[in-house]
Amino acid sequence: MPSHPRPTVRRRRLGAELKRLREKAGVRMEEAAERIGGDKPKISRQENGRQGVSKLEIEALLALYGVSDERLRTALTTLAREGRRKGWWAQYSDILPAGFQERLSIESDAARILTFQPMLVPGLLQTVEYATEVIRSVDKDVTEEERDSYIEVRKARQEIFARENPPQYVCLLDEAVLRREVGGPAVMAAQLDKILEMNNPPKLTIQVVPFSQGWHAGADGAFNIYSYPDPMDLDVVNLDYLDGALYLEEDQPVGRYQLAFDELRATALASRQSMELISAVKREFMNRA
């Protein structure tokens, strides 16, 4: 069976819009395929984001669908071009699993990122020392060169917050994340200090779900929700598991995770109270360092 590339965010956006325009125009997939000299499976792959669309194919399909709005035509042509562009992580493709490269693609294009983490500080917030300990724990056979490359990826990911228009980032941490000792007291104190420095509501907000809440909506594990800036975009939920990652785009499951995040945030300490708790835990680690 042929292997088609995993869909990037841009291809998802483009495919979803082409499908909407085709259905609005009442054009069957077979007709669209004939117009671009392809077949029905090709149209299906393009609309699912599994295959790119050339400039000539875009122009032919939009003409068939009766799309005359020049702004929309330009936007879709731009999406098609950018969908073929490689991300900064391509240079690490020899060590990064395909699923994680998909995660980086989704992350890099997001306008808003909602994260819940019950176990570890998320990669976007990790210090080098904390990340090093996490990498060592996950793969005890990792070479020094591989570890350095993973750290470079972590640091490159965090550049997302240095952009001219960074995404809104809301991170909910279970209190266990603050107290689970990774790398020793000094590493933890420095990590918590970085969290305190990065917190900057409403653009970058970090809140803690305290132990006192007991059982909560995030008890099933970590998840991320990525949202995008215009109506043709799809919200995406990311779930990591032992051997890979799962991405959800259908309205119903995405809606459930959005509701779970809202419920979690309602049980979390306010940002100021969260920072007070993080500061207190940081002092505990500093006293032991």
Image (cartoon, helix red, strand yellow):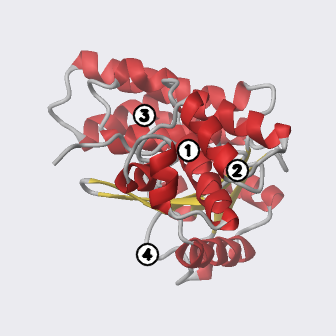
Residue toward you, 166 or 288: 166
Look at 55% across and 49% down and name the residue there.
Answer: 12
Q: Which residue is mark 1?
A: 9
Look at 55% across and 36% down and name the residue there.
Answer: 57
Q: Earlier in the sequence, mark 1 or mark 3?
A: 1
State the SS at label 1.
helix
The kind of residue tagged 3 is Ala
State which quadrant residue 68 falls in. Answer: top right
State the SS at label 2.
loop
Q: Are marks 3 and 2 in contact (CB under 8 Å)?
A: no
Q: Report how far apart the C-alphas of labels 3 and 2 lie in the structure.
A: 28 Å
- Residue 52 locus on image (x, y percent): 47, 37
Q: How many marks?
A: 4
Q: Nearer the viewer, mark 2 or mark 4?
A: 2
Q: Which residue is mark 3?
A: 131
Q: Which residue is mark 2?
A: 228
- Residue 113 locus on image (x, y percent): 66, 51
**Badge number at residue 220:** 4
The kind of residue tagged 1 is Val
Residue 120 appears in the rendering? no
